[in-house]
Amino acid sequence: MTSYILRIKSVSEIDKTVLDKYSNSSLFGKFLNLFLEEGAESGDVYVAWENNKQEGIFVYDSVENAGTCFTFRKDIAKEFMQLKENMDFYTEIDLNLKGLTEEVHRLKLDSGNLNINIRNEIEIFHGDQIEEVLTFMKQAYGKVSERWIKSSLNHGEKCFLCRKDGVIYGMSWLGRVSIYGRLHSLYVSENYRQMGIGSDLLAARILWAEHTGIKELISEIPLESPFSKKIAEKNGFEVVGRIYHYKS
């Protein structure tokens, strides 16, 4: 058991050596500071302590009741998981519990080697109509934090959209840290699927990433989504690891 778990008020309270350790070893290490900064602004960040040492970090969103932990210890991960009831809990550690598995895919970009065609019109959201993005994401996921959307946009994340007659029917996001990008939160309205929109949202983000100097992309794809996996692999993504999704 850990001595205690504390909610922190500022990312600066986390030991730099701890941040460096996770940054260098986690699949999402390059994005850890981004996760923490967005988490501190739109949710809560917790640190697990044992024997006066920080042994884990937990980022939690109360609106979505979802959290992600960063630790090398299974016991610490389980303690974080017990903080909230009926929470969607994500970790890179296999806790040997009933849950879902997502594969982490990576694409290394080599300038000039892309051969991508886009059939549907894609645009990048510029933050002028945040309510329509919030409405679409609520329709897609049931619940979403407006504070997270605002924080993500403020930290330079890009939201890619497909519209028809002025109405959003496809959306995806790209977070960036230096030359590294993370693709996430792709959703297409049910009535507009099988039209290549998901593929085009992926292609648009890849093209934007290459054009703006990103050298490496990662994306999580559930094992239950073989079609998404097929599209990713068709575009050159390779599986480099797994994350685990549990209900507390």
Image (tube, helix red, strand yellow):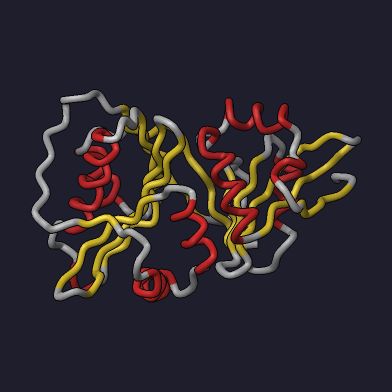
In the rendered view, tell whether residue 1 sits above or below residue 239: below
Please indicate whether residue 237 sits to the left or right of residue 51 in the image: left
Tell whether 150 sits left or right of 122.
right
Across and down, in percent, residue 197 comes to 18, 58
Q: Nearer the viewer, residue 87 or 203?
A: 203
Which image quadrant is residue 147 in?
bottom right
Residue 96 can be seen, yes or no: no
Quadrant position of the C terminus in the picture: bottom right
Residue 28 coordinates in the image, percent (x, y): 51, 37
Q: Where residue 79 sits: x, y (%)?
A: 76, 52
**Location of residue 245 in the rendering, given as x and y in whole percent from the top left corner:** 54, 53
Quarter in which the N terminus is drawn: top right
Q: Image point 35% across, 70% down: which residue?
A: 129
Q: Is residue 184 above or below residue 55?
A: below
Q: Is residue 67 in sight in this rendering?
A: yes
Name the residue: 89% across, 36% down: 52
Nearest the camera: 111 or 202? 111
Residue found at x 53% / y 48%: 244
Quarter of the image for residue 109 reads top left
The residue drawn where x is 44% and y is 32% is 178
